[in-house]
Image: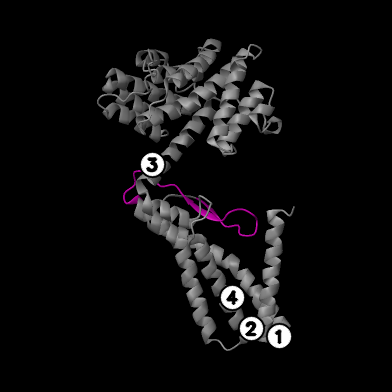
Amino acid sequence: MISPRRRLVAASVLLVLEAVVFALFVTESVVGAIAAVGVTCLSLWVHVVLHECGHLVVAKLLRLPVVAVRVAPFTGWRSEVWVRPAPPATALPLRMVLFYLGGPTVNLCTAAVLAAVAASTGTASTRVALFGAALVGALLAVVNLVPGTSPRSDGRNLLRWLLAPTATRAALRAGYYQEEVRRTLRAISRGEVGDDRLADPVRDADDPRLALAAFQRRWSTGHAQSAADFIADAERLAALARADGTDPLAAAAIGEALTVQFGLWYLYAAVVNGSPVERREVVELAELAQLAFQAQPHLLSARVAMGLAHLLDQRPEHARSLLLDIRPGVDPPDLCGVAFLLRAAAECHLGNHADADTLVRAAGGDHQQLAQVVAAIRAADPVPPLFAPAPMADA
């Protein structure tokens, strides 16, 4: 079977040869035909650079925060300008639509200029080269505007912001929250496993710590094939933590990671999306958190996991008591911020709004999405349920 990369190379070579033959009929010169096609091919790099410059200029004009610029058309990497706007920013859908139109617009304008210049020149080779370059620019613009399978295509992102701006803004907010969860997981990680020892699938790692590290890497890099695969791997990891032969400290590390990872998302889903977690999930998280808390009750990571489990179980007084002793100068800063905010959520449940506001200020601005979750709990009346009641059995 021929690989997709080889098929692409073969198609590209065939296309270049066909272009040379066509140019030969127009220019009637082998050297002129090859030169014209060479200029056309090189124009692709120029059009890619102009495309990204278009995105970059629009981003600067609209004051969209630019976090990365990469132009690499021949290296296998995707060329892109990456912006990270704040979810509540003013007129964000319109600004994002203009941002995604910036690149294709520059390509179309460049193609029009090249076609106009080509029409006024008398040299056959130059005319073919310019028309070819104009065609490449126009095709690049059209291809980028066609909604494709890639979640980063200009056309797909345009449609998302045009047709579903509210949902797209919510997805942007959820993406920020996911990064906060990842930072929290890195704060509780002990860093005992090097990348060279990791096994990719969790099921292939016999050592609990290797299994946990492989699972976290797959989750953080998006290598899990689907949500079902991800949950199945998490269930296997949880079973490994409960196994009699598993070292208590390794089981504690797994319990902390799974409780924090799923618990923070359950909290977000219940408060922001109005989707309380099922009771059985709360019970399972409490069991995993208990594994961590029993092994090392003095660690802030274990208390955060146990406090989060108590909070989801709607026992805010228990969560509050576990998170009273937070040491900003000793414990990891990211973990301290999460601990402050979880305690603030507990204070909101208990009606201590002034204490909750003080804790949110103490957490700083590094966990803005989690702070907004706490603010939503504080503003709700009554406080939203965090888990759904178990269905009653038929008599």
- Marks 4/2: CA distance? 11 Å
Please provide percent x and percent y for residue 140.
Answer: 54, 65
Mark 1: few/some/many CA within 10 Å (<14, 14-19, 20+): some
Among numbered discs 2 and 3, the one appearing first in the sequence: 2
Whether 72 is among the magenta residues is yes
Q: How far apart in space, not on screen, are marks 4 and 1 (Cα)?
A: 17 Å
Per the image, the residue denoted by label 4 is 132
Colouring rule applied to residues: one colour
As helix, strand or loop, the secondary structure at mark 4 comes to helix
Mark 1 and mark 2 in contact (Cβ < 8 Å)? yes
Tell me which label, 4 or 1, sits earlier in the chain.
1
Q: Which residue is mark 2?
A: 125
> Residue 230: x and y, percent?
56, 32
Q: Residue at x 27, y 23 (%)?
A: 353
The amino acid beneath tag 1 is Ser
Q: Assign a secondary structure to mark 2.
A: helix
Residue at the spot of label 1: 29
Q: Amino acid at mark 4?
A: Gly
Q: Could you tell me the amino acid type at mark 3?
A: Ala
- Residue placed most toward the observer, 182 or 328: 182
Labelled pair 4, 1 in contact (Cβ < 8 Å): no
Alpha carbon distance from label 2 to label 1: 9 Å
Residue at the disc numbered 3: 170
- Looking at marks 2 and 1 on the same chain, the residue that comes earlier in the sequence is marked by 1
Magenta residues, start to end:
68-92
